[in-house]
Image (tube, rainbow, N blue to C red):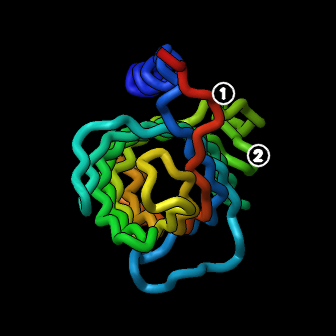
Amino acid sequence: MQFAVMCCMLFFGQNSWSQRPVTLSIFNESTAVPYDNLINTPIHPGVQIGTEFHWKESKHFRLYPSISVGYMFHRKLFQGVYANLELGLDYKTSFGLNLKSKIGLGYLHTFSTQQEFQFNNGEYRSGRDKGNSRLMPSFTTGLGYRFNPKKNDSSELFLLYQSWLEYPYSPGFIPLMAHTNLHLGLKFYPFEKNER
């Protein structure tokens, strides 16, 4: 939980939003073996919002940290909220195409989407689900297209394939669960730059 609070403080506590992009994506989550299928059905929807921080950039490479928060709904299994820190590396082409990769670590809190029962005084009673805390290490690859390749602050349309692990999943039974998210999103600069 402290990890999620720290991410939110970084995300909302910056006063230089005029130079910071917003990344917004919708995605399909699935419990799947990574890189087996690109699109998995049925659809389990999610939404994510985040930002990126400038670190190192050259003509063809860009190295940057990013943070994001999101929500996902996996029918008949769980719904979850998360906060994620990632380190991204983009290879930029002169015509606007970016080859993207990220490695990350996040905090996930899941809640059951089914009715929960607890055994008390010899009988089962319907109980409230307090949720479960998980770590979610991730690896992401994908493509982006910058609408104005000559500008560093160009808007970008991206498609990302993220593989991540849920740990601990079921201690003593299944320690890890593999997931994939297919993101379709946009990076944009909604705030005007301060003129000096």
Relative side of 175 to 57, left or right:
right
Where 18 sits versus 83, above or below?
above
Q: Callout 1: few (<14), some (14-19), or many (20+) C-alpha neighbours within 10 Å?
A: few
Rendering coords of residue 38 (x, y %): 52, 82
Rendering coords of residue 127 (x, y %): 72, 32
**Between residues 183 and 36, which one lies in front from this camera angle?**
183
Where 63 sits versus 195, above or below?
below
Q: Which mark is residue 121?
A: 1
* Residue on which disc 2 sits: 115
Amino acid carrying label 1: it is Asn
Q: Callout 2: few (<14), some (14-19), or many (20+) C-alpha neighbours within 10 Å?
A: few
Q: What is the C-alpha distance between the residues marked 1 and 2?
A: 19 Å
- Residue at the bottom extreme of this rendering: 36
At 76% from the left edge and 46% from the top edge, which residue is drawn?
115
**Between residues 129 and 156, which one lies in front from this camera angle?**
156
Q: Which mark is residue 28?
A: none
Amino acid carrying label 2: it is Gln
Rendering coords of residue 63 (x, y %): 25, 49
Relative side of 137 to 125, left or right:
left
Determine whether the residue tagged by mark 2 lies in a helix, strand or loop. Answer: loop
Rendering coords of residue 76 (x, y %): 71, 60
At 28% from the left edge and 53% from the top edge, which residue is drawn?
62
